[in-house]
């Protein structure tokens, strides 16, 4: 009865246009607020003249840093990101003032009259400039533009290279990417009778939003109640900046004692919000004549932009996964994040792995060609297997290591072996060149050694037999609420109709961390199961007598509660009433703590993640010889996600992740000449359309994971992290040309 | 007085509203929040509505030009009794919904396609939805949904017309 595998609790609201996103939420008497940017990339001695703006019709107030009672800056790791700039502009996206008016149009008109002056500085826009020891130090903390350095010291690669049959030394480059959620940032804050400010915002993490807001206003966390509403996508991108949008409305609501709304245009969203880190990767990889990877040296540089955000965590994942899905005995890697005056970079789906996979998965194909080995053979030889040790020294023995199984399934489904032989390799009779390519990956689930990892759920039974559930995981559109409901329905053996997901707020449920790192399903559903088991135990204890059995014999299935024999059963309505009569609250609280992980910062060794998702994606494409245009023909993706709770949504995550990876591979790039972003809307920042994508087939591999109480791991990020190198490999197999940077653009002259 | 048909009902438009975009007019004057603002430059399709049977970007469409015309928004797709249109049902059944922000525009673009071509191929569906961006789904389940809707309406002999218009004639 609970096998509605495409169930979504928000489907009707969304398909009927009734779902309320932040800009659809209105309170009478709300003021409208807009941000003011200054056309500086780097500057000091900021001066703001609001006089003309304040005289503009409808303008109520202009807020600047001087109005901030708490800290003007905040951040998840360093508190360096200006919610409002006080004195120093470090990037073109910095907000210097906020203009409030009765209508949005009036606010926009007044904002244009705010005069900003400052002393410009020469912006540092490349990693190389910023790393110059004499360069101006950009961050407000520390004394260097090198803001992160992660090292991995696993074995000793240096002496190995001499004995290698093949040593590849290659450079790769990845670009700045926008998350491009379809809904731009928006928030409305409302002062409540008791002094609490309620916040309804388009944000990925209510708890993170609350931290930003409390710091900005200098008030306790409990003064703010951040509500979950429909969110039009996040993909990692609605944390810091979206939290700031909320925090700014909260400040204005506090100072003006009225509801305040701020809704971003696409241009503001792209200008201000953080992006995916562009990387420069240098790899030296030594292979034996059989194709065994003997040694790897890697130096990886990430542009962190003007503020730190989560750069240390993004680059940490790049470090832990620097050799892709391969076991290598000798690895030295150094991963740096460097501050520049570019728009800052932070979380985006994939989080440091798409960049390293782009390099590693091409290196494997390059080595295969040079050594005369099949691309599948070289992968099979080196990939992690049951009982392997990863490059961080972690023994993979606590779950099924299924990479080979996953790769085999994808290879079989797409017909890789035969099609690989048919690739054009630069020569064809017709107008097009044909190629097939694949890539494999493994991905540590959840936060790993990045942070404290636990999650809470609450089950609140009602005396009429209906049941409310909530968890600390946040619905961003991915379907997390529906996953929790499906898991709970199965565990309690009840009809889904009996269950409702309670709209979350930061004041209802304990802070369960952020909904990131593909941790929603594994952490959230595990916590729901813990709460559900406590709930059942409570019920069993109080119902056993009525059911003429011992508490341990009480069973929950077919939407009823049963004793040992089928003669004794209670409906949920009867059962809940019985609890009421016994004066017992049918309520349970469950916390799931992630299994232990470990990390040694000096060596980059440890049990980085408590489990891994295994993935393979393959793509067929053709290249028009005259235009150089790449047309994708077919994509097959396989992922071992442990267990699929909602099959349609799992496949939807695969398709969507692949689409974002295709965008990265072939079309997307934030351009920022002189530090000013020029790709501010979808005319210049092109994301894949229906006609840019081929049919995509998803293969769900299910080796239940013992580290997850439901057996499920997750799919959000694995889906995105490997199609780009698969495309690059297919482009090589079609054209004979290797592309080491993205987006891949083929000049037809290069094909001749 | 300026008039137009909105989801099957005749409405009057104030002169002062004629210079607004339909996006703002529908959201701010008629509280039709299913019309979504994704880019305000006619690039993403989130604000798609139907004007005299054609899919239009409401963010670039002045109210002035809509006078005398018939408009359908997502709120007009369902039947007066609240049952959803077969296209909407297919979006739910095919798992085509994630964040939902593009969904109203997608449903309406699909509606216009199926009005003109009740049995489209997948390739034709892709072409018809080319102007509507989605960042969540990779479009696969959306195309499945449109294909499913076409099949169901064909097999069950259901009219394609928006629910609000069918309710009116019934």
Image (cartoon, coloured by chain):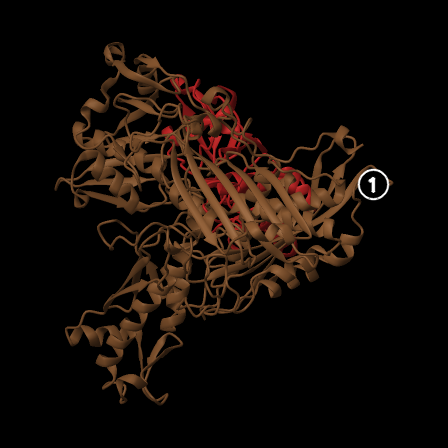
Chain colours: A brown, B red
**Does dot 1 land on a helix, a strand or a loop?**
loop
Is residue B161 at least partly visible in the picture?
A: no
Q: Residue at x 38, y 62 (%)?
A: A525
Q: Residue at x 48, y 31 (%)?
A: B5
Disc 1: host chain: A
Q: Position of residue A51 (x, y in %)?
A: 23, 10
Q: Position of residue A259 (x, y in %)?
A: 23, 32
Q: Position of residue A204 (x, y in %)?
A: 37, 44
Q: Is residue A279 above or below residue B153?
A: above
Q: Position of residue B168 (x, y in %)?
A: 49, 41
Q: Residue tagged by mark 1?
A: A427
Is residue A194 at least partly visible in the picture?
A: yes
Quadrant in the picture for residue A237: top left
Q: Using residue A82 as the reference point, say whether residue A496 is left or right of it.
A: right
Residue sitting at the far left? A194
Q: Using residue A514 as the reference point, say whether residue B50 is left or right of it.
A: right
Q: Nearer the viewer, residue A235 or B96?
A: A235
Q: Nearer the viewer, residue A303 or A262?
A: A303
Q: Nearer the viewer, residue A152 or A617?
A: A152
Residue neighbourhood size for the residue with mark 1, other residues' Cα within 10 Å, grouped as few (<14), some (14–19), many (≥20): some
């Amino acid at each position: 009865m609970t096998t509605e595998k495409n169930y979504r609790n928000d489907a009707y609201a969304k398909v009927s246009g009734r779902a309320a996103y932040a800009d659809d939420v209105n309170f009478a008497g709300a003021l409208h607020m807009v941000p003011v940017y200054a056309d500086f990339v780097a500057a000091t001695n900021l001066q703001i003249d609001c006089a003309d703006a304040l005289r503009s019709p409808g303008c109520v107030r202009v807020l600047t840093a001087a109005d901030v009672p708490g800290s003007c800056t905040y951040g998840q790791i360093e508190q360096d990101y200006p919610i409002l700039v006080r004195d120093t502009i470090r990037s073109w996206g910095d907000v210097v003032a906020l203009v409030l008016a009765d209508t949005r149009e009036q606010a926009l008109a007044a904002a244009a009259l705010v005069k900003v002056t400052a002393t410009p500085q020469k912006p540092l826009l490349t990693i190389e400039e910023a790393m110059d020891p004499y360069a101006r130090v950009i961050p407000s903390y520390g004394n260097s533009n090198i803001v992160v350095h992660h090292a991995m010291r696993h074995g000793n690669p240096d002496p190995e290279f001499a004995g290698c049959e093949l040593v590849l030394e290659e450079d790769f480059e990845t670009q700045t990417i926008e998350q491009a959620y379809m809904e731009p940032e928006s928030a409305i804050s409302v002062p409540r009778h008791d002094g609490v400010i309620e916040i309804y915002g388009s944000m990925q993490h209510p708890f993170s939003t609350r931290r930003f807001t409390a710091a900005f206003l200098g008030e306790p966390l409990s003064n703010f109640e951040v509500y979950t509403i429909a969110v039009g996508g996040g993909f990692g991108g609605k944390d810091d900046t979206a939290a700031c949008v909320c925090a700014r409305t909260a400040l204005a609501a506090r100072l003006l004692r009225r509801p305040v709304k701020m809704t971003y245009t696409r241009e503001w969203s792209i200008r201000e919000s953080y992006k995916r880190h562009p990387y420069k990767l240098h790899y030296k990889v030594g292979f034996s004549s059989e194709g065994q990877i003997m040694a790897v040296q890697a130096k990886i540089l990430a542009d962190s932009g003007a503020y730190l955000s989560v750069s240390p965590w993004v680059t940490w994942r790049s470090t832990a996964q620097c050799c892709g899905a391969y076991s290598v005995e000798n690895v030295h890697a150094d991963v740096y994040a460097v501050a520049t005056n570019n728009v800052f970079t932070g979380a985006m789906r994939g989080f440091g792995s798409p960049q390293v996979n782009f390099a590693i998965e091409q290196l494997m194909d390059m080595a295969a060609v040079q050594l005369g080995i099949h691309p599948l053979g070289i992968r099979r030889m080196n990939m992690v297997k049951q009982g392997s040790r990863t490059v961080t020294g972690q023994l993979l023995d606590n779950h099924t290591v299924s990479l080979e199984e996953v790769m085999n399934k994808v290879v079989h489904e797409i017909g890789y072996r035969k099609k690989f032989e048919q690739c054009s390799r630069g020569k064809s009779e017709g107008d097009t060149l044909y190629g097939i390519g694949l890539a494999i990956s493994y991905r540590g689930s959840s936060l790993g050694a990045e942070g404290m990892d636990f999650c809470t759920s609450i089950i609140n039974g009602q005396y009429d037999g209906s049941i409310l559930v909530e968890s600390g995981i946040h619905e961003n559109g991915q379907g997390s609420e529906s996953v929790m409901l499906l898991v709970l329905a199965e565990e309690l053996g009840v009809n889904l109709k009996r269950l409702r997901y309670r709209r979350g707020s930061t004041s209802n449920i304990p802070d369960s961390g952020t909904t990131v790192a593909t941790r929603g399903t594994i952490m959230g559903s595990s916590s729901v199961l813990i709460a559900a088991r406590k709930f059942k135990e409570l019920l069993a204890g109080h119902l056993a007598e009525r059911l003429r059995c011992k508490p341990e014999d009480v069973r929950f299935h077919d939407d009823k509660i049963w004793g040992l024999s089928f003669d004794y059963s209670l409906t949920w309505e009867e059962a809940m009433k019985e609890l009421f009569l016994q004066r017992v609250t049918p309520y349970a609280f469950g916390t799931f703590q992630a299994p232990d992980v470990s990390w040694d910062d000096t060596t980059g060794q440890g049990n980085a993640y408590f489990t891994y998702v295994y993935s393979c994606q393959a793509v067929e494409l053709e290249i028009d010889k005259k235009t150089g245009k790449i047309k994708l023909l077919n994509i097959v993706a396989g992922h071992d996600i442990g267990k699929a709770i909602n099959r349609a949504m799992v496949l939807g995550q695969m398709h969507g992740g692949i689409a974002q990876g295709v965008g990265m591979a072939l079309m997307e790039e934030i351009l920022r000449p002189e530090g000013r972003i020029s790709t501010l809307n979808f005319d210049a920042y092109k994301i894949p359309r229906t006609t840019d994508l081929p049919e995509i087939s998803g293969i769900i591999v299910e080796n239940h994971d013992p580290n997850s109480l439901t057996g499920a791991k997750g799919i959000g990020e694995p889906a995105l992290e490997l199609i780009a190198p698969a495309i690059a490999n297919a482009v090589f197999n079609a054209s004979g040309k290797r592309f080491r940077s993205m987006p891949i653009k083929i000049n037809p002259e290069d094909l001749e | 007085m300026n008039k137009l048909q909105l989801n099957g009902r005749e409405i009057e438009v104030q002169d002062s509203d004629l210079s607004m975009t339909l996006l703002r007019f529908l959201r701010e004057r008629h509280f039709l929040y299913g019309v979504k603002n994704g880019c305000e430059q006619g690039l993403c399709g989130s604000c798609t509505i139907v004007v005299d049977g054609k899919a239009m970007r409401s963010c670039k469409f002045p109210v002035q030009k809509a006078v005398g015309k018939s408009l359908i928004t997502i709120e007009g797709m369902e039947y007066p009794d609240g049952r959803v249109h077969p296209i909407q049902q297919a979006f739910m059944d095919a798992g085509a919904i994630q964040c939902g922000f593009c969904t109203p525009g997608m449903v309406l673009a699909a509606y216009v396609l199926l009005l003109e071509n009740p049995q489209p191929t997948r390739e034709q569906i892709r072409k018809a939805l080319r102007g509507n961006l989605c960042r969540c789904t990779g479009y696969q389940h959306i195309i499945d949904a449109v294909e499913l809707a076409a099949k169901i309406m064909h097999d069950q002999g259901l009219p394609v017309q928006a629910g609000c218009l069918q309710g009116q004639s019934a």
